[in-house]
Image (cartoon, rainbow, N blue to C red):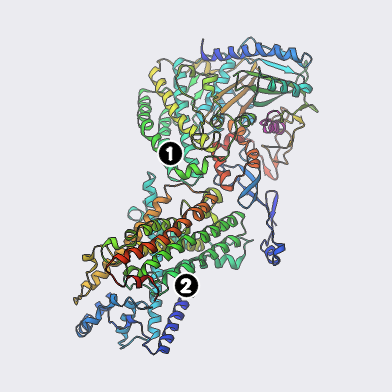
Amino acid sequence: MSTQAARIAKGKEDAEKIFPMVKEKFPDAVLEESMPAKNADPFLVIEPASLHEVCEYLKNESELNFNLLHTVSTADFLGGDDEEGRIEVTYFLDSTEHVHRLNLKVKLPREGGSVPSVCDLWQTANWHEREAFDLMGVHFEGHPNLVRILCAEDWEGHPLRKDYVIPESFHGIKNIVY
Amino acid sequence: MSLSLSLQSLLFKTNAWLAQAEGTTPAPEGGEGAAPTEGAANAAGDATKEIVEAAPERAFMLNENSTSDESGAPYIESAITYVLNVEQSSWWIAAFSMLLACLGVFGFINVFALFAVWLERKVSAHMQCRLGPMEVGPHGALQTIADGIKLTVKEDIIPKLADRPLFILAPIIVFTGTFIRFVPLPFGPHLNAIDLNLGLFFIASVGSVEVLGVIMAGWASNNKWSLFATIRTATQMVSYEIPIGLTFVAVIVSAGTLSLHGIVEAQEGWFFNWYMFRNPFLAVLFIVFFIATLAECKRAPFDLPEAESELVSGFHTEYSGIRFALFFMAEYAAMYLVSAIAVVLFMGGWYTGIPMIDEIGMNTTSEVTPWLGLFIKAHVLIGKALTLVFLQIWVRWTLPRVRLDQMMYLCWKVLLPVALLCLVGSAFWDLCMGAFSDEKDYFMMIIPK
Amino acid sequence: MNRVGEFHVHKNVRKRFVVMINAGDLRTEEMLLNMGPQHPSTHGVFRVVIRTDGEMILETESHIGYLHRCFEKISENVNYMQVVPYTDRMDYLCAMINNLGYAEAVEKLMELEVPERAKYIRIIACELNRIASHLLAFGVYGLDLGAITPFLHAFRDREKILKIFEKLCGQRLNYTYIRVGGVSFDMTEEILQDIQDFLDYFEPDVLDEFNRLLSYNGIFISRTANVGIIPEEMAINYGLTGPSLRGSGVKRDLRKDEPYCIYDRFDFEVPVGDGEQGTVGDCWSRYIVRVKEMYESAQIIRQAMRDIPGGAFIDKKASNKVKPPKGEVYHKVEGARGELGYHVISDGTDVPYRVKARAPSFCNISILDAMASDANMMLADIVAVIGSFDIVMGEVDR
């Protein structure tokens, strides 16, 4: 088995071990367990409101000990005729002690949705959530300083939204599109 | 510069009046001998010969007159008296000769700065596996001249929010503060602007003027980083003057004189007569002095005032063109200055340390050898000083920079106690050695008359 | 009024001093200092607003984004292969590993196995690049602390690596060498010989020379040891990875813990900060981990060069048509600065739906504000601390 395959298998193994534990603890919070058959990563979709509780459990349970939040990623899905548009916020958790990982996902409506901040659990979430707010417009409740981080303070809109229109000029600087 | 000149003439005048009041001759001793300068010798060789023949014992007695209180620029002065065909020098001739000497020092600073910048660039380049400047002149020798021309023709920028008068005045004061310290500094026996009998004290006291200029520069720039650098500089230079002062005191105790001439004369003979070899305490003080002067010159590892990775460029961040060049020149002039002082204090000044060579040109009636002797001695002094300058460059391109608290720790808790101990130790050492030596007047040297 | 960031410089600051005649009026003031975005030791366009009390730092506030080039937005508009050059420009000091992370993430989506030779070439290129990156980190750290000579010595050796890369792919900095399906050019015998020569020159003497020149220099140790201490817990909590995390004594290296590519075939050590000088987790520990890692990377390259098989260096068929099926992956690799993660979402077309890069420097530098507020740091220390993270602003801002 190649290294790549071994790594994928390890990810699935972790998921098979950890998903039931979370589901047992929070039966209502877990909305969906995504275990793709192929190479794609497994995800645990949970309800936005209970994200903080779940994360607290994942971090403090000694058997899991997810002490490293790798990143907070976001993706915008416009939706179509058959499905509603949504924003997916994905938390990639890692444990330096047990070397296992977990991908948590929350799905928010495109407008007006919010998700509790996990800044108090992992300080690194501070900047990651600011970035997600800046580029995707996700609102994190309870974040100590939710301001733009990469774009200018007076930037309008959230550039990574799929329906974002690139402005023609910014402070008199013309935007030249090649 | 004008300040230093007027100060000198004033000093000289005061001395002349004092001498007159005491009923002695006002003319400096240098004026008595008709020692010709090179130019004068070429111009009127025959006439010189006559004088030499007429008074051979007086013509080359300059070295023996070093015990005098103050002598101006004797070589220039005697040349002027010779050219003007005056019997005896008068005070305005002496003042004029000092003016010429100051111009000579000014020229030396300029030429040295050009050379030292090139040297620094080449030395650092070769230490860093590079070549350094190679384009202008052979091995880039003329690069600094090109840079100097560029700096002088650059636009003179004064920031809008800067304090204009202070901003303009600061580089002048810094440069003057360095330049004025060259006044008592010998480049060879009697090769100086004026040999003050308080030479070392003069150097120590007017050295602080530079700090004033640096503070003005940083403050007037109205730049927070410059202000930081200024405060660092003031802290550093004021602190490190204390170990330097203690070193001076120790040497003065040993030599029994404040005159730089007198200190060099006291180290005549074999090289173990040099203060850095004669006395272990003074050897330690030499190291203390070298470290302290690195800080005084703001050289690495004490280059906190211009720490480019912390403070961008320090107190002269906002300066450009000729004003920046003045700061730059003052820095390199100070490098030479402290090295030359170290040579005078510890390394036997213009003496090679081998009496046979030092005696060339002494007590002889020949026409050429005195000039040869002077030539050798001047080169020995400048050569030793350049060695120390090289050492400074070497240290700069090797060591990282210390932090402010570490710098202060080194000064107040290491160098200062060591210098104090060595001062006491060296005094006792001299006493003990003096008691065992045959020189009966040894005690007289360290006890003030 | 002169506007500098959020605070104002009074036109005539000196007027304040005129009123200070009475000793009772004498007071000290805190100063707001704007360090960056144009500052020599912020490694690019990082900006820190520092509140200082004289030389002591009371508080800092980091600002980033001055080099934001919309990597993620651009990636949504170009096809999978065209994203690779943009990954180069994130961490431009170890572009190979950036390429590798992205290429492997897409290969994972495509269920593609690259040829064996390509894997070995990737390892050699990545580890050489890691040495080059650490050499720069070593030199620049000396530069931050005022030692200029080690910087140029490091550049002398980095230049040799860049020459090898130039021979390999025609580029010195932004290689675009590791692509989806393999690598763009074969590593010829001549280049392998060059690498061998470089290692023979580099490994025995040069690292020792560096240690003598900088690592064990008294002033260097006094400037870095016991400065900017990050305890293990705090380091993990702030998402530190790579040498910065290992400096705090955490033995975590993705090449060992979650091997990717073929790292499980090689034998190497993971150096961690052990408090040899000062404390575990101080600037010196973070620094020395990098120096030791250069040696380990050299070991990996030697083993890879010994075992390298023949065959194809790229899966031409796969690389010509990169069109992964629907799905999403998160792939992380051990970069020179920490763990580099790519979150790639595919919608089945040849244009990625979303590419998110987890930049190690972004997470590493986020700890700065927290460090500065509780440690008694001086202005010179903050330069040492920023330097010890070895940040690359191209990666922080993306």
Q: Position of residue A110 (x, y in %)?
A: 77, 25
Q: Residue B110's mark?
A: none
Q: Which residue is mark 1?
A: C154
- Residue at mark 1 to residue at mark 2: CA–CA distance: 45 Å
Q: Is residue C272 visible?
A: yes
Q: Residue visible at 64% across and 61% down?
A: B161
Q: Position of residue B183 (x, y in %)?
A: 42, 71
C393 within the magenta span: no
Question: Residue B372: percent from the left, percent from the top?
Answer: 23, 69
Q: Nearer the viewer, residue C350 or B183?
A: B183
Residue toward you, C244 or C122: C244
Circles 1 and 2, Cβ within 8 Å, touching? The answer is no
Front in this rendered view, residue B14 or C384? B14
B165 horizontally vs A2: left or right: right
Residue B424 coordinates in the image, percent (x, y): 42, 61
Tell me, yes or no, if residue B145 can be seen here. Answer: no
Identity of the amino acid at label 1? Ala
Residues in magenta?
Answer: A121-135
Q: Quadrant of residue B442?
A: bottom left
Which residue, given by chain and number where applicable, does mark 2 sit on? B1
Relative height, residue C40 to residue A167 (above, below): below
The residue type indicated by label 2 comes to Met
Can you say whether C374 is above or below C12 in the image? Answer: above
Q: Mostly what secondary structure, the magenta segment?
A: helix
Total numbered circles: 2
Q: Quadrant of the N terminus of chain C?
A: bottom right
Residue C80 position (above or below residue B198): above
Q: Relative to residue C325, is residue A162 drawn left or right?
A: right
State the image quarter where residue B247 is shown: bottom left
Quadrant showing the C terminus of chain C: top right
